[in-house]
Image (spheres, rainbow, N blue to C red):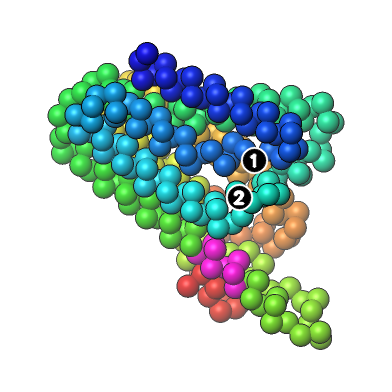
Amino acid sequence: MTPLLLCIWIAGGASALVWILSLITNEHSWVDRLWSILPIIYVWVFAASTGLSDPRLVVMAILATLWGIRLTYNFARKGGYARGGEDYRWAVLRGRMKPWQFQVFNLLFITLYQNAIILLIALPAFTAWEHQTPIGPLDIVLFVLFLGALVGETIADQQQWNFHAWKRTLRQAQGPDDAGSTPQPRFLQTGLFAWSRHPNFFFEQAQWWIFFFIGAAAAGSVIQWTVLGAFLLTLLFIGSTVFTESITKSRYPEYAEYQRRVSPLVPWPSRRPEQSASPSPAA
């Protein structure tokens, strides 16, 4: 069995597992719980098939592992693996669809489409497996860029974690006279989030585009069908961002002003200096 065929079988098994679990538990974040684990397995399958003799594939597997460890940790500390840790957006979407419509959506999009993307983003390792060429200066640059994007996403997630911890602490410290007051600001606007509304999304996508270019560097050409993974991941993030921001805007009307002055994805200077309304909770 070729490593590609083995990965396809693993993806098929994962798809069946998350679909069955979603029907049993009525939770629909099982794909999220495997998202940071499956790419590690896929890339190591390709690296192991060479007997770990190809340096590029070994480094790609290590990079995917570092990515997965960071994402798994961040997902776990937010309660993603706990019972009832379903993504809040699925509940919102269920409320907007008929039950049978959501079940079709669950099978086709949540289960099959997302599992396909999880496999596809790892398949630049297949390109590298097909073209086992020596590591060159371009590879080194791409390895460093991947690690830089990994650090950027780690910082963004930590700033977001610190902000929500600050809000929880503030609520717990409130007395009976101000129990109904709301912490200000109500959403994170400092740190990297003063430059991008979703810096963690930017760095996440950047890592998988860099991963694709590593595979392309092995082949000596960017004309590779494995670009589908990074491309479809970007489309997924675009749809997810639009949906998430529509929910946030409905909760926080002031989010519209934040949208007006801060870049949606790529970190970029704000249109005007940020106005400080509170201590910096992201520090």
Q: Name the residue at 61% across, 24% down.
A: 16
Q: Name the residue at 20% across, 42% down.
A: 140
Percent coordinates x, y for residue 100 in the rendering: 82, 26
Is residue 162 a member of the stretch shown in magenta?
yes
In depth, the one of 50 and 186 nearer the eye is 50
Percent coordinates x, y for residue 272 in the rendering: 52, 65
Distance CA(mark 2)–CA(mark 1): 8 Å
Position above or below: 161 against 64: below
In depth, the one of 72 and 232 nearer the eye is 72
SS label for mark 1: loop
Check disc 1 and give the amino acid type: Ser
Packing grade of label 2 (10 A; few <14, some 14-19, many >=20) is some
SS label for mark 2: loop
Check disc 2 and give the amino acid type: Gly
12 left or right, relative to 138: right
271 left or right, relative to 207: right
In depth, the one of 230 and 250 nearer the eye is 230
Q: Residue furthest top?
A: 1
80 left or right, relative to 74: right
Q: Residue furthest right?
A: 98
Residue 188 in sight: yes
169 left or right, relative to 96: left
Magenta part, dominant SS: helix
Percent coordinates x, y for residue 95 in the rendering: 82, 41
The count of marks equals: 2
Magenta segment boundaries in residue numbering: 159-166
Q: Name the residue at 59% across, 69% down.
A: 165
Q: Are marks 2 and 1 in contact (CB under 8 Å)?
A: yes
Q: Which residue is mark 2?
A: 80
The disc at residue 29 is: 1
